[in-house]
Image (tube, rainbow, N blue to C red):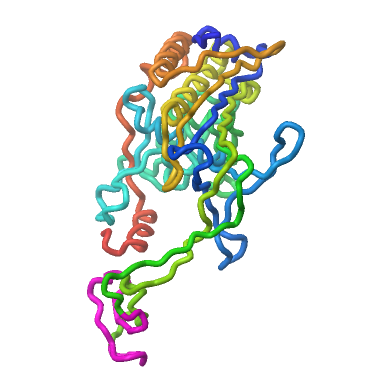
Amino acid sequence: MQLTARTLIGACADDSEEAGLLLAAELEPIAGPGSPVKPASYAGRAQGDPPRHQIDKRWSEDRPVDVAVIDNVPSQAGRHEAQLDALAATLGIPSLVLDLAGLTLPEHLPSSISVFRFAHRHADAYLRDAELDGMAFLKTPIGRALVQGTDVNAEPLMQWVPQSLLYGFWMSHLGKKGSQAKLARSWVSEIVGWEPAALDTVMLGVKGDPLNLTTTDKVLYDENDTAGWTLTEGEKKSTAAKGKKQEKLSEIGHGQVPTESGIAALSFRRITQRATVSFAGLRRLHFGMPERNAAGRAVLVALGLVGHTAAFGRSFSLRSGCDLRPTSQAWTWLGAASDEAVDPLAPAGARALFAEVVAAAEATGLPVGGAWRAEPVVLTPNPSLRAAIVATYPGAE
């Protein structure tokens, strides 16, 4: 079976009984099967507890087995959105950008942040605390449209932030009397490592020093600029350096120091990725009339396919020590009466399908395609957000 615009639009109709799509892949570490990879790690349950992996049990044939979630559902959505951010101009999809160029930030920080990078998408506090041409963004026509957008009034969100309709949102930052609109995600994806050879292993090491400087020597230094440190006499606490910190020499990077750098990479029997897009979930969305409903939902399916193939259609790196490549993939149409194998799309094929679906949706009067703004909407932080940034990075002003 080949995916076409007509197929997707028909499956997304109000009266459709089709269930969705399943995209499954077998993955392999670039060093080969069984080579250790690093799952995501999370803070311990209590302060001071060591970091931990997301460990679970899943059914494998007729028995439950240990698994580690290498990349979970929210993280996978973020990887889609990072690709859509990079492809926004090519795809013609809209973007909102918070411009930070007026602040002098450290080099490792971005000079702007796209809505594709916000944790809560268009419901994020960064957009709440932004301005457009000197006016509070949420009081502008675009901002008001985003606040008013819901599952039953999805057209404004389709025009400005279609990704929110696919990956979900919760407008939770406007206060008790503000909008609390929320939408469950219809695209769900995760990468799982099956039957790890060991759990709770730690990585041990030594930070080396060619001269093996004495780590017990005390130094005075400014936490904001460790290059200007001075050596103090012996172990006695100095009182001469106001505003400076006194610690061991090892705290500023000298000397040999044994390390226990948290939980180690794990070796798995196999690694899989499973992604689904639910047509039933998308049927929550309404755009005013049946033909628009079907076409709008199909646009979102195609958008997800673009993000998925761009992020995972070739070898990819999730984090340090977690580089994977697909060794096989199987796409399945989850039909009303039976399932059917689907020809997987390459990234270029997914983009072509997206363009075809967008053209069909535009013909129904949906605000897509030519109605999408070609240039990003550029916002700036309001005075309160700007003050918070400067308080965090005093040299930013």
Q: Is residue 28 visible?
A: yes
Q: Is residue 189 above or below residue 302?
A: below
Could you say which is closer to the camera, residue 131 or residue 192? 192
Q: Residue at x 28, y 55 (%)?
A: 105
Q: Position of residue 311 (x, y in %)?
A: 43, 31
Could you say which is closer to the camera, residue 279 or residue 141? 279
Q: Is residue 146 above or below residue 361?
A: below
Q: Is residue 181 above or below residue 262?
A: above
Left or right for 220, reference 22:
left
Q: Residue at x 24, y 71 (%)?
A: 227
Left or right for 48, reference 334:
left
Q: Residue at x 51, y 50 (%)?
A: 265
Q: Is residue 227 magenta?
A: yes
Q: Is residue 138 visible?
A: no
The answer to which image quadrant residue 282 occupies is top right
Could you say which is closer to the camera, residue 126 or residue 23? 23
The answer to which image quadrant residue 294 occupies is top right
Quadrant of image for the N terminus: top right
Quadrant of image for the C terminus: bottom left
Q: Position of residue 141 (x, y in %)?
A: 41, 32
Left or right for 226, reference 237:
left
The answer to which image quadrant residue 60 occupies is top right
Q: Position of residue 188 (x, y in %)?
A: 58, 32
Q: Position of residue 352 (x, y in %)?
A: 40, 14
Q: Which residues make up the magenta segment?
A: 214-240
Q: Residue at x 38, y 59 (%)?
A: 388
Could you say which is closer to the camera, residue 373 or residue 281? 281
Q: How many marks?
A: 0
